[in-house]
């Protein structure tokens, strides 16, 4: 059987691979502390679960419009107004089968074979694999702790070429949990816009970012770049990972394009999930999600203190998402070796930097603190014993 070059070029997602190995160890009766997958342990808010039960009462569940339920698009628009202080026409909201589908549609709309796309290194691997599937060539721009492992204007300028067609930025980032400072992100977007390049801004973790002094959610990129394509998801802030529901906000000119593509690629996102997701935007659900954001900040503090105590430095403390990106170079092990041995010897599942790029691939490891506080405490304790064993 002939396998396409496209399929052969896609590397495994090692976070999932380590997850499979962790499941195999659990099947043998071991307790594995799973800190490898970015999946909040909270689940969907109770009102969302109840709404799903209600809609699954035997009624017909036909396709929705390709762009999503009008009521859900309106609710997302109101969310931007109330949480981020930016007006978004509901007509510009495209509801998708997870944020991944939003990225697929955006790439299909914007990418031509041979285009160059600039992406930070480290970054979430699936983003670059999606645009490469449409023929783009991704250029991974090395970042450092000095720029919070995020792009800045000098780095973007130094790598810009005549073939650069677009730029992808995630803020907060997976795997580092760090945000691009708003002024810097606005300058990056302006630079790209002036050169006629598109901007895809991954804001999947935006509402899990730290609030400012006025206890206000961070600004969306839409506040300073209304023509950017902004991608978001119900998976992280709303805890609906397995529901596979996301959205993107696109410029007016892209709405009919995205509609045609959605009709052909997906028809629509899950009808019952869309109906249930309306319950995300009740005052009770939003208040609960804010309590969970605060709890994640508490877990982050626990993890940072624990990693510091056992001698695993975190070059840049995160200010969003639920990831810590720590340095293992002092151990004498590569990130892959560290994660493999931590899983086998300490029964702690982590994700090697190999997943996220080139420049920190061997030296850094991602830990997800989306697990419970008890599991995080146990995981850090086990890692401390594992490190001690390396020194014997």
Image (tube, rainbow, N blue to C red):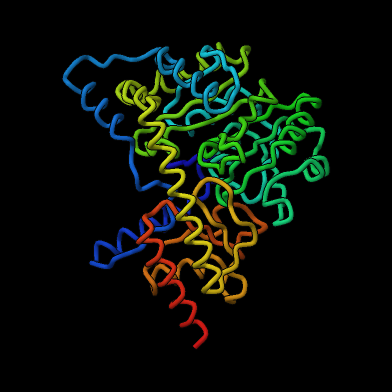
Residue 145 x/y as whole percent: 70, 57
Residue under the image location 64 percent in, 57 percent down: 316
**Residue in front for this viewpoint, 350 or 374:** 374
* Residue that extends furthest to the front in the rendered view of this protein: 214
Q: Is residue 54 left or right of residue 143?
A: left
Residue under the image location 40 percent in, 34 percent down: 287
Q: Quadrant of the N terminus?
A: top left
* Residue that extends furthest to the left in the rendered view of this protein: 58
Task: Please say if 387 is above or below 28.
Answer: below
* Count of labels in the image: 0
Q: Is residue 390 left or right of residue 243?
A: right
Q: Visible in this render: residue 365?
A: yes
Residue under the image location 46 percent in, 54 percent down: 298
Task: Please say if 305 is above or below 111.
Answer: below
Residue 191 x/y as whole percent: 79, 31
Q: Quadrant of residue 242?
A: top left
Residue 216 x/y as whole percent: 57, 34
Residue under the image location 35 percent in, 33 percent down: 243
* Residue that extends furthest to the bottom in the rendered view of this protein: 392
Q: Visible in this render: residue 263?
A: no
**Residue in front for this viewpoint, 320 or 2:** 320
Task: Please say if 135 is above or below 352.
Answer: above
Residue 166 x/y as whole percent: 70, 31
Q: Is residue 190 left or right of residue 88?
A: right
């Amino acid at each position: 059987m002939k396998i396409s070059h496209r399929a052969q070029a896609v590397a495994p997602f090692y976070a999932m691979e380590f997850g499979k190995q962790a499941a195999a160890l659990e099947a043998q009766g071991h307790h594995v502390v799973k800190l490898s997958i970015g999946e909040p342990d909270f689940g969907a808010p109770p009102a969302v679960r109840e709404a799903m039960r209600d809609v699954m009462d035997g009624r017909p569940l036909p396709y929705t419009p390709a762009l999503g339920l009008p009521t859900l698009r309106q609710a997302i628009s109101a969310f931007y107004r109330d949480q981020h202080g930016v007006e978004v026409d509901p007509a510009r909201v495209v509801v998708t089968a997870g944020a991944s589908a939003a990225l697929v549609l955006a790439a299909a709309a914007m990418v031509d074979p041979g285009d160059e796309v600039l992406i930070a290194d480290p970054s979430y691997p699936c983003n670059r694999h999606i645009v490469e599937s449409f023929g783009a060539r991704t250029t991974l721009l090395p970042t450092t702790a000095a720029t919070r492992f995020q792009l800045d204007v000098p780095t973007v300028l130094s790598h810009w070429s005549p073939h650069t067609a677009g730029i992808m930025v995630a803020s907060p980032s997976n795997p580092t949990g760090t945000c691009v400072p708003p002024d810097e992100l606005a300058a990056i977007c302006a630079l790209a816009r002036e050169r006629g390049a598109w901007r895809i801004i991954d804001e999947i973790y935006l509402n899990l970012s730290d609030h400012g002094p006025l206890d206000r959610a961070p600004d969306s990129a839409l506040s300073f770049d209304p023509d950017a394509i902004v991608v978001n998801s119900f998976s992280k802030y709303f805890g609906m990972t397995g529901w596979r529901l996301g959205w993107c906000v696109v410029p007016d000119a892209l709405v009919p394009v995205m509609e045609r593509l959605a009709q052909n690629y997906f028809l629509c996102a899950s009808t019952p999930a869309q109906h249930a997701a309306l319950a995300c935007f009740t005052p009770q659900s939003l208040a609960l999600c804010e309590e969970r954001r605060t709890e994640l900040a508490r877990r982050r503090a626990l993890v940072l203190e624990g990693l510091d105590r056992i001698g695993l430095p975190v070059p840049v403390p995160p200010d969003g998402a639920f990831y810590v990106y720590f340095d293992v170079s002092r151990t004498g092990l590569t990130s892959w070796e560290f994660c493999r041995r931590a899983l086998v010897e300490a029964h702690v599942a982590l994700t090697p930097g190999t997943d996220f790029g080139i420049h920190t691939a061997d030296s850094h490891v991602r830990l997800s603190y989306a697990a419970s506080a008890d599991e995080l405490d146990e995981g850090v304790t086990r890692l401390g014993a594992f490190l001690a064993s390396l020194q014997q």
